[in-house]
Image (spheres, helix red, strand yellow):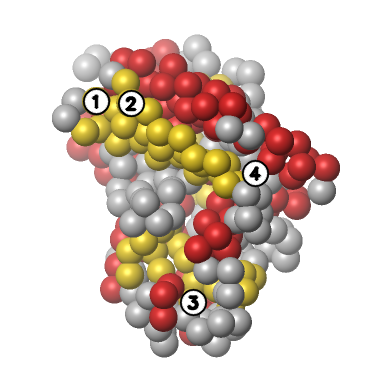
Amino acid sequence: MKTGITKLTIASRESALAMWQAEHIQARLKALYPQIDVQILGMTTTGDQILNSPLSKIGGKGLFVKELETAMQEGRADFAVHSMKDVPMVLPDGFVLAAIGEREDPRDAFVSNQFKSLEELPPGSVVGTSSLRRQSQLQARFPHLKIAPLRGNVQTRLRKLDEGQYAAIILAAAGLKRLGLGERITALISTEQSLPAVGQGALGIETLAGADEVAALLAPLNHPETAACVIAERAMSRALAGSCQVPLGGFAELRDGKLYMRGFVASVDGARMVRAEAEDTPENAEALGQRIAQQLIAMGADEILAELESL
């Protein structure tokens, strides 16, 4: 395609996984547009700096994207690459998602140096996770386990496991695979046993609204099937006011041309949990997510959410 753009700058967090994602998009763009110079602007975000508190206590996942958005507003970057599960459900005014890339493995991964599965963990074993979604599902299935907070990048989390601070940790399989650490996965947890986070495993590309020429260059990176799934998941979460403070999961997948989606909302201890599922066409992704949210609310999700807000 013809364009007057000669240089593109990608805003990215500086963690190894974020840089892998930015370099992946950089390589895709260089292959598409060899005439364009594609650079990466690495940045440290507030979410990367505050590691001694759970995300749910310090403001949620938007802490990982705010500085990148500021770089775009100030003209230092043209777009940002994110893990979709880190992107707030409502983007700030003036920003849009230009593309959603093809999804990696969406499942959670069980990682342990001593045990082969969650079922093998003895009572009182300490399992590390930073996610209320994972915590609630773990506690519902394994009330005898102790869940402890786990922050930091992937390598930091693995180091804490190797130092013996945890019997096991739960991480996103996608991150481990993308970093070439797939051999650290002891077992993959099925989506039936641990429903993934909204957008888990997918990459999102965020731009300024109105940056039409940049958006046109990014359009070939959009993966329509993944985009439909993530649109449905985010619509559900948005309708439920989903954030890090809320234990919820949403996962959509294409089956025989239909979009099949499951969602849940739970109390942190997993004692109360409501689940819903439905299917529709990919074209109705947004409506499907909203329908799942309404089903969950009808089953009592709003009561669980109200209790969480009062904590």
- Report, in whole angstroms, how far the alpha carbon at label 3 lies from the one at label 1: 36 Å
Viewer-nearest of discs 3 and 1? 1
Q: Which residue is drawn at 47% across and 27% down?
A: 292
Image quadrant containing the N terminus: top left
Instruction: Please indicate whether residue 35 sits to the left or right of residue 130 in the image.
Output: left
Residue for badge 2: 279
Asked which secondary structure carries label 1, the reply is strand
Q: Which amino acid type is shown beneath numbered disc 3?
A: Ala
Circle nearer the N terminus (2, 3):
3
Asked if the residues shown at circle 2 and circle 3 are in contact, with their CB atoms under 8 angstroms apart, the answer is: no
Q: Which is nearer the eye, 236 or 160?
A: 236
8 vs 203: above or below: above
Instruction: Please indicate whether residue 125 sits to the left or right of residue 256 in the image.
Output: right
x, y percent for residue 95:
56, 22
- Report, in whole angstroms, how far the alpha carbon at label 4 lies from the one at label 1: 28 Å
Q: Which amino acid type is shown beneath numbered disc 4?
A: Val
- Few, some or many residues within 10 Å of mark 2 (<14, 14–19, 20+): many
Residue for badge 3: 168
